[in-house]
């Protein structure tokens, strides 16, 4: 970019950051300082997930559902994954489209609400990995546990490996939210409708929601003779 484009790019980013409710993530590879600090870091989770992928990264396909400002998506694009990030907030998608220019690789972003219909339309083989980071508790609150259990069944039938970061019933949500009243005692109950799974804890990670750390899991189908999990 020349200086004029550079200035215009920064102005668009600054304007978009001011439009949203918060700046949840840092901006991956963004070379300029921003006036609004992010609510949480992302590199800790990305490094842990990268280790859990055990080198099966380059050339794989990722869906980052609820991608927010694209940090997790672009972190893995930077390491050779082909990724699609989706988010319900058009402001977030616009920021992702702006900052992806700083990371070489294949990344696309789209405004999309995670739903059972979206999941059921995914053809097996479309993705090797999917991320659901601090997203599913909102759907449990709005649509109910049984709805999310149905989505998890469909997802684990279509995508070999899921990485899910789950809110806990022991959390105290910010004013205006009440997901704690809707969550099950066991956060892994969202997988109760699924065929047998291999669920591995990746780690616990701090958020901006009080002192409770959230668990992040690697979820895959139990290995069988026809298993093609990454």
Image: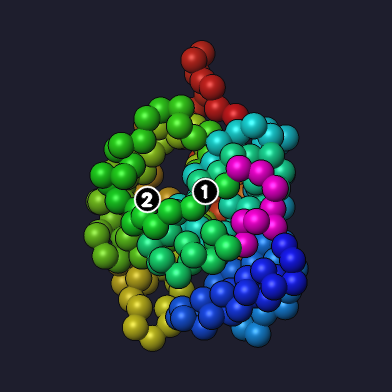
| Classed neighbour count for the residue bearing mark 2: other residues with Cα under 10 Å, few (<14), some (14–19), many (≥20) | some
Q: Quadrant of the N terminus?
A: bottom right
Report the magenta residues as a range: 99-106
The residue that appears at 38% across and 62% down in the rendered structure is 88
* Residue 40 belongs to magenta span: no
Q: Nearer the viewer, residue 217 or 100?
A: 100
Confirm whether residue 2 shows in the render.
Answer: yes
Dot 1 falls on a residue whose secondary structure is strand
Q: Nearer the viewer, residue 122 or 201?
A: 122
Left or right: residue 9 versus residue 137 is right
Q: Is residue 136 above or below residue 157?
A: below
Q: Is residue 211 above or below residue 168?
A: below
| Classed neighbour count for the residue bearing mark 1: other residues with Cα under 10 Å, few (<14), some (14–19), many (≥20) | some
Where in the figure is residue 20, as x and y percent of width and height?
46, 78
The residue that appears at 25% across and 51% down in the rendered structure is 147
Residue position marked by numbered label 2 in the rendering: 189
The residue that appears at 63% across and 40% down in the rendered structure is 81
Where in the figure is residue 117, as x and y percent of width and height?
26, 44
In the rendered structure, which disc, 2 or 1, sits on the residue that comes first in sequence?
Answer: 1
Q: Quadrant of the C terminus?
A: top right
Q: CA distance from mark 2 to mark 1?
A: 32 Å
Residue position marked by numbered label 1 in the rendering: 108
Q: Is residue 82 above or below residue 75?
A: above
* Colouring style: rainbow
Tell me the tag on residue 229: none
Q: Nearer the viewer, residue 35 or 217?
A: 35
Q: Nearer the viewer, residue 19 or 217?
A: 19
């Amino acid at each position: 970019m020349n200086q004029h484009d550079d200035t215009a790019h920064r102005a668009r980013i600054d304007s978009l950051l001011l439009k949203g409710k918060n700046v949840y993530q840092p901006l991956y590879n963004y070379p300029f300082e921003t006036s609004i600090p992010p609510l949480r870091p992302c590199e800790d989770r990305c490094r842990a997930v990268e280790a859990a992928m055990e080198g099966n990264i380059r050339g794989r396909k990722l869906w980052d559902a609820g991608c927010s400002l694209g940090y997790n998506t672009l972190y893995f694009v930077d390491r050779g994954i082909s990724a699609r990030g989706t988010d319900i907030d058009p402001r977030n998608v616009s920021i992702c489209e702006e900052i992806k220019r700083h990371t070489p690789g294949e990344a696309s972003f789209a405004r999309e609400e995670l739903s059972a219909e979206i999941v059921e339309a995914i053809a097996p083989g479309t993705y090797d990995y999917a991320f659901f980071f601090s997203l599913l508790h909102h759907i449990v609150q709005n649509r109910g546990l049984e709805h999310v259990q149905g989505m998890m069944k469909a997802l684990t039938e279509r995508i070999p490996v899921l990485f899910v970061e789950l809110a806990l019933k022991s959390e105290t949500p910010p004013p205006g939210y009440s997901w704690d009243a809707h969550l099950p005692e066991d956060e892994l109950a969202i997988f109760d409708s699924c065929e047998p799974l291999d669920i591995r804890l990746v780690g616990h990670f701090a958020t901006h929601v009080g002192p409770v750390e959230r668990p992040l899991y690697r979820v895959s189908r139990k290995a069988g003779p026809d298993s093609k999990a990454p």
